[in-house]
Amino acid sequence: MKPWRCMAPEERIGYIDGCRALAVLGVVLDHCLVHAAWAQRLVNQAPAMNPLFWTVTLLSKGAHGVDLFFVISGFCLSYPTLERYYREDGVNFDLDRFFAKRMVRILPPYYVALFLCLIAYVAFRMTHAAIPTAMSANINIWDVVRQLLMLDRGTRLANDAFWTLFVEFRWYLLFPLLLALWLRSKRSYGVLLVCLVIAYHYTRARSLDLGVLPAFMLGIVAADWHILEHPWRKYAPILAAIAFNAALLLEPFASVPGAGGVEEYGFYTQANVGWHLTCFFFVVAAGAWNPLRSVLSLRPLVFIGAASYSIYLVHQPIVSYAEEQMIGRLGKGGAFVASFFTSLVVGFIFWRLIELPFYRGHVLHDRLTGRLERIMGMLLGRVGIPQRFMVGRGESAVF
């Protein structure tokens, strides 16, 4: 097996890595446009019969690669447990091991990326150079501490792209309960999903975390449908197209809470349930429709997907710096292309040197996971939370 191949059961599904590749490429393309002043002027103008306008508008939809990442996250976390559950008619879920594995997989690369961003920030400040727009100005020590602890409220980020990591990390706290609920009562799970959408739009519970939670939850459903070969899978391509059109219709109304209670509107908003459904049905279609699955399983896409986390961690400051510094020498098109490919190359280097040792099966990963598992077990015991619960269909099931 090649060293870059993912080793967890869900990661052996090649088309999921292909989905990851589309997600990260879409996000990078969007940020190449976000940090290009000429592209933003074009997008903000009234629609016109201008091929460049429609090209930029279409590429900007790559922002919803984040929504696709959220759905994939729910899929990948739930797939191994669901597969064992249906094969063995029940499953034990180890909370201590789950949290330990997530921390080892996510935090070390994130901390290295944060450290590199802070070094770059200090260098920019000391040389009085312009700080890239993807990095917040006037970062202080408390902002650093909050980022280490993944506390994002009021935090000035060293890398604007980090916000999704904080949201996903909080999702891990809810995941075991949501997965157990899905296995216990799919109807209750569906009711909860609808209630969350209503709560986000019509109550004071409105928050970004609540707005994107349906995407994670739909990922669990997608994994279940894949394993059981749900009959609706054959309609997924058509349903994805319908959901895509619904997402476009909802874009003028979609918003997220901004600073000072001001709503932030935009086509890129990650709280658009239409885009959540589009990504959900796309992932379902990828597993059910052979032509799409074959394309997403192509080796180059699988390779990009394997490195997608590293690319995501490092790309935005590189993109913004390259766009802002190279446009005078390379022009609009040259700066766009240079920023795109530079961020990918640096992302691959980061993946090979930093992220790869934290894959399951590597010595460093296994040692850290074992130690953290013992620590998490002790902490869970101290607060009275059982380290393991069982979900099953028989009378012996705990939940």
Image: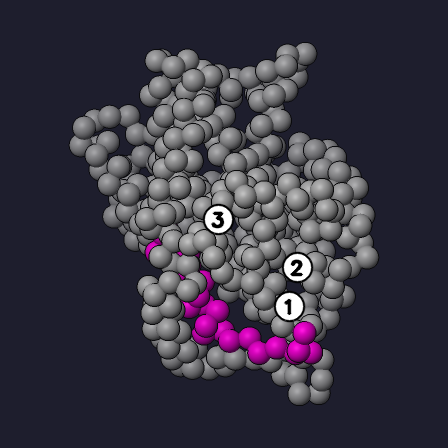
Q: Residue furthest bottom?
A: 396
Q: Residue furthest left?
A: 126
For mark 2, what is the residue? 223
Residue at image location 18% in from the left, 32% down from the top: 126
Task: Give the amino acid at mark 2.
Answer: Ala
Report the Cα–Cα distance between label 3 and label 1: 22 Å
Residue 231, image x, y percentages? 81, 57
User: Is residue 216 in sight in this rendering?
Assistant: no
Q: Amino acid at mark 1?
A: Leu
Q: Nearer the viewer, mark 2 or mark 3?
A: 3
The label on residue 102 is: none
**Residue 82: assigned label:** 1
Task: Please give the count of numbered marks on the rendered protein.
Answer: 3
**Secondary structure under the numbered disc 2 in the rendered image:** helix
Q: Is residue 40 above or below residue 399?
A: above
Query: Which percent across, then down, holds residue 385?
Result: 48, 79
Query: What is the quadrant of the C terminus in the image?
Result: bottom right
At 41% from the left edge and 13% from the top edge, which residue is drawn?
Answer: 331
Instruction: Indicate whether 300 appears above or below 30.
Output: below
Residue 99 located within the stretch drawn in magenta: yes
Does the rendering let one see residue 329?
yes
Query: Can you give x and y, in whole percent of width and height, for residue 398 in the image?
Result: 63, 83
Q: Which of these two is toward me, 272 or 183? A: 183
In the displayed structure, would residue 158 be above or below residue 220? above
Q: Specify the amino acid type for callout 3.
A: Ala
Q: Which mark is residue 306?
A: 3
Magenta range is 87-110
Horizontally, is 373 left or right of 63 in the view? left
The residue carrying pointer 1 sits among few (fewer than 14), some (14 to 19) or many (20 or more) residues within 10 Å by Cα, namely many
Q: Earlier in the sequence, mark 2 or mark 3?
A: 2
Of mark 2 and mark 1, the one earlier in the sequence is 1
Residue at 71% x, 84% y: name it: 394
